[in-house]
Image (cartoon, rainbow, N blue to C red):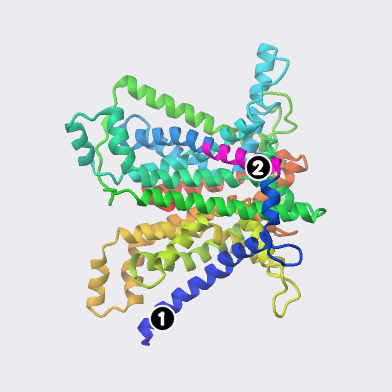
Amino acid sequence: MSRRRALPLLGVGLLWLFLALFLVYPLLRIFYDAVTDEGGRLTLVNFAAFFTDAFYLRALWKSLVLGAATVAASSVIGIAVAFLLVRFDFPGRSLFGYLTMIPIISPPLVGTLGFIFILGRAGSINVLLQDVFDLLRPINFLYGLHGVVLVETLHLFPMITLNVVDALGKIDPSLEEAAESVGARGWRKFWTVTLPLMTPGYVAGALLVFIWTFSDFATPLILGVQDLLAPQAYLNIVQFVDRRIFRMGIVISALMVILAVVFLMVARRWVGLKDYASLSYTVVERRRLTRWKQAGAVGFLSMLMLLSFIPYAGVALASFSKGWSLTPLPLSYTLQHYERVIVETPKYILNSFLYSGLAVALCIVVGVPIAWVLARSRLPGRGALDSINTLILAVPGTAIGIAYIRAFHFDLPGFDRGLTSFWIIMPIVLAVRRLPYTVRAAHSSLLLVHRSMEEAAQSVGATGLRTIRDISLPLIWKGIVVGSLFSFMTSLQEASAVLFLALGGWEMITNGIFTFYIAGSSSEAAALGAILIAVAALSVLLINRLAAGRMGGVFG
């Protein structure tokens, strides 16, 4: 075999080795634990125990209802926002386009704390209502399943918006014009032409919203909802007393992975059965709204942003407050909470930047070659590689964290401890969790670069690596940076996996927030949350400038 042929195959082999070792093997291990007993014998008793337990069946049903309700609410808001931004022109449209991305930068843990400070039983709104209307009991805005839906919807609707904006930008305007020429207007045009054409983007966003909600355990736990699958998986694993309950946590994790994969396969199958004419971005002329419709659009978006920014207001006030209790606003302010988290306990911030930076470097080293294989090669296994990369988006973080604990707890050759006893496990799990964002961004950029440019370089003697270095990379660097920034931002926010894996001294910002909040130091938790939001806001600003409003490709 020639060297020119052997090197690409070796590279693909190394990519597969990484994915097999840090994704496939941990998932197989968790499935093995779920279908075996203490003696290692195959059995379905564990799953039988789950499906004959009324509590766990109710948790499964409520988790599905929660996911569906969040998708429905996020879809109504996300699609409406996407249409306003893409199809119409009104004052402040560009500003709203940027602000719409902001809610997604706040991790659910931080967002939940912010909502509690404002809408909780002793939050600003209830204190005001009790003072003005002499209410005897505070209004329950948050605690319960309805509160989880509210928090998740206001956090995740941008995922629908971004994907629908991306899909609408690829719809040929002549198709909608043809529908109008035969009398299809308004809702009829939307249902018969526009909605089917934007289905791939919408389904990608809806699937992410569902899986994200389905696998989030921190938000329900803080809001007092424990009878869901993700919280039960977390609670069962972190207790070290009853091995039967611990085994049930593993079973729940395996079941969550199975359900997520099924949802992914059904969504891809449904989209694959349809034909679409959305092949490339097109220029759509925005229609100028009338004065009253402009006021309606600005009013709707302003109200949505006001609700979405409630967590930021709550986190900011709490981070500067000094003894904030039973008053609408803090009576005094201080910087001591920031001093404590930055000067006295800097490990949370330093670890987060170190691990997230290493994770991004690993995402680039692994993700860009994967994108290249998918977009430019005809090597065998491309379809499987794409499926594995997409699978990562579907696997809940809770399951990944538990899978790593089970898979890498054995002693490594030459060491007297397992990989989970080394801090390097943290950037590895972050890289695996965020790899699809780098792959998708680089892949989308490669699809916009015509092959003829690379073929022209090769025709004058440029080798494959030189063509990539001199032609391809200069043309796709923005996509790589966008994917890397998003991977970095979301790695900083990761809670599900790192809460399981972090040992003493390895804690990240999300660990610190959780630790401070549980210990009753909510202002310190808010200070860490504010730092996280500030970094994420800067990342989103850079992403928005580089991606030019086409971030949907990162998710799709």
- The spot of residue 202 in percent (x, y) is 40, 43
User: Sequence-wise, which precedes: disc 1 or disc 2?
Assistant: 1
Comparing labels 1 and 2, the label whose residue is closer to the camera: 2
Q: On the rendered structure, is 548 left or right of 53?
A: left
Foreground: 501 or 328?
Answer: 501
Residue drawn where x is 55% and y is 55% of the image: 395
Q: What label does residue 57 carry, if any?
A: 2
Residue drawn where x is 48% and y is 62% of the image: 388
Disc 2 packing (10 Å; few <14; some 14–19; many ≥20): some
Residue drawn where x is 43% and y is 47% of the image: 204
Foreground: 31 or 440?
Answer: 31
- The spot of residue 352 in percent (x, y) is 62, 56
Disc 1 packing (10 Å; few <14; some 14–19; many ≥20): few
Q: Which residue appears farthest toward the top when viewing the image?
A: 133
The magenta segment: 53-68
- The spot of residue 111 in percent (x, y) is 60, 39
Position above or below: 377 against 79: below
Q: On the rendered structure, is 416 left or right of 252?
A: right
The amino acid marked with disc number 1 is Leu
Foreground: 318 or 210?
Answer: 210
Which residue is identified by label 1?
7
Q: Which residue appears farthest toward the left when viewing the image?
A: 181
Is 37 part of what is drawn in magenta?
Answer: no
Q: Secondary structure at mark 1?
A: helix
Q: Secondary structure at mark 2?
A: helix
Q: Main secondary structure of the magenta part?
A: helix
